[in-house]
Amino acid sequence: GNSVTQMEGPVTLSEEAFLTINCTYTATGYPSLFWYVQYPGEGLQLLLKATKADDKGSNKGFEATYRKETTSFHLEKGSVQVSDSAVYFCALSDGGNAGNMLTFGGGTRLMVKP
Amino acid sequence: GAVVSQHPSWVICKSGTSVKIECRSLDFQATTMFWYRQFPKQSLMLMATSNEGSKATYEQGVEKDKFLINHASLTLSTLTVTSAHPEDSSFYICSAAFRDTQYFGPGTRLTVL
């Protein structure tokens, strides 16, 4: 079956530090890959996505590249801000149909200190 | 675009009562919606897949008679927690499928006393 593995948190960084949150996956076929962000007490917001190998998703300074050879989709940001403090979820969808189930990683909590 | 709302955002009820949570896609039509449950500091657990005009598909271990799902229109799905008990207290989140992505609602925090 499908699975997503994320690095365990919390990840604590100082403002303006470089961020990497690792995500690897196991899936049959050609999944679409997503990063969602959850701020305290809220639902999930789509941060970025990639639908095929070598695609790079990017948004708000975050980016992730779909690496089929290493089955990875690591999230990066060059300079984090306090407002980036949240929980980040990596997820995959088996196929391009949004009606397909999402398989989530366990989430990684990011804490950015001023 | 692709905004999903939930109502209410939080609810407190007495044990034994039923609670209805609404999930609406505001600016798109969604033939498929999903209901998740999230425990503190944990990932999301899929409860069921809701398809407009047909019965919901429940995940293993989720009681269909306790968590009633109705997807009456292309923009509305409801989750009713029947005869709620304290162990049903949780954060419930819905999502709606649009093109190749799921968009999530803001969540509903249910507390059963």
Image (cartoon, rainbow, N blue to C red):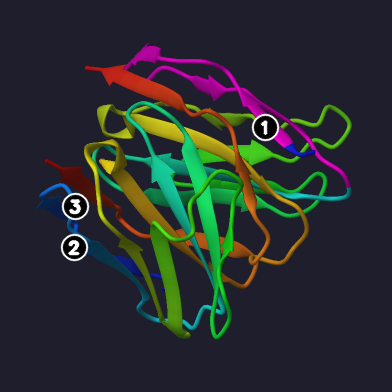
Q: Which residue is mark 3?
A: B16
Pointer 3 local density, CA inside 10 Å: few below 14, some 14–19, many at least 20: some
Mark 1, secondary structure of its residue: strand
Specify the segment rendered in magenta.
A3-28
Q: Are marks 1 and 2 on the same chain?
A: no
Indicate the quadrant containing the C terminus of chain A: top left, top right, bottom left or bottom right.
top left
Determine crowd level at label 1: few under 14, some 14-19, many 20+ residues with C-alpha closer than 10 A.
many
Camera-near label (2 vs 3) is: 3
x, y (%) of residue A8? 52, 15
Q: Position of residue A6 (x, y in %)?
A: 60, 24
Identify the amino acid type marked 2. Answer: Pro
Camera-side residue: A41 or B45?
A: B45
Could you say which is closer to the camera, residue B86 or residue A39? Answer: B86
Image position of B100 (left or right of A78) = right
Mark 1 vs mark 2: in front? 2
Q: Which residue is at a point 16% across and 53% down the rendered structure image?
A: B10
Mark 2, secondary structure of its residue? loop
